[in-house]
Amino acid sequence: MLSNQEIKCQVSTCKYNDTNKVCTLHDIQVGNTGSQAHEKQETQCNSFQAN
């Protein structure tokens, strides 16, 4: 399995988002907002931390 070389992020209020809209974490946790995700709106980055 290949690892992500760069994680793009549009969430400017996350402390891990640098000025180039790239996540600075080595890895992230992604989860569902409900029991099962069927659309991208039903997912979220569980690694988010506010500035």
Image (tube, rainbow, N blue to C red):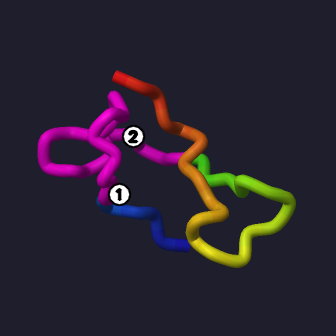
Q: Give the image location of residue 18, x and y in percent.
A: 20, 39
| Contact (Cβ within 8 Å) of mark 1 with mark 2 | yes
Q: Is residue 25 above or below residue 44?
A: above
Q: Give the image location of residue 47, x and y in percent.
A: 53, 38
Q: Residue furthest left?
A: 19
Whichever of callouts 1 and 2 sits on the residue coming sooner in the sequence is 1
Q: Quadrant of the N terminus?
A: bottom right
Left or right, 49 with respect to 21, comes to: right
* Label 1: which secondary element: strand
Q: Is residue 6 above or below residue 19?
A: below
Disc 1 crowd rating (10 Å Cα; few below 14, some 14-19, many 20+) is some
Q: Residue at x 41, y 44 (%)?
A: 26
Residue type marked 2? Leu
Residue type marked 1? Ile
Q: Is residue 43 above or below residue 26?
A: below
Left or right, 43 with respect to 51, comes to: right
**Residue behind mark 1:** 7
Query: What span is in magenta?
Result: 8-28
What numbered label is drawn on residue 25? Answer: 2
Spatial distance from mark 1 to mark 2, Cα to Cα? 8 Å
Q: Give the image location of residue 14, x and y in percent.
A: 36, 34
**In front: 39, or 28?**
39
* Label 2: which secondary element: loop
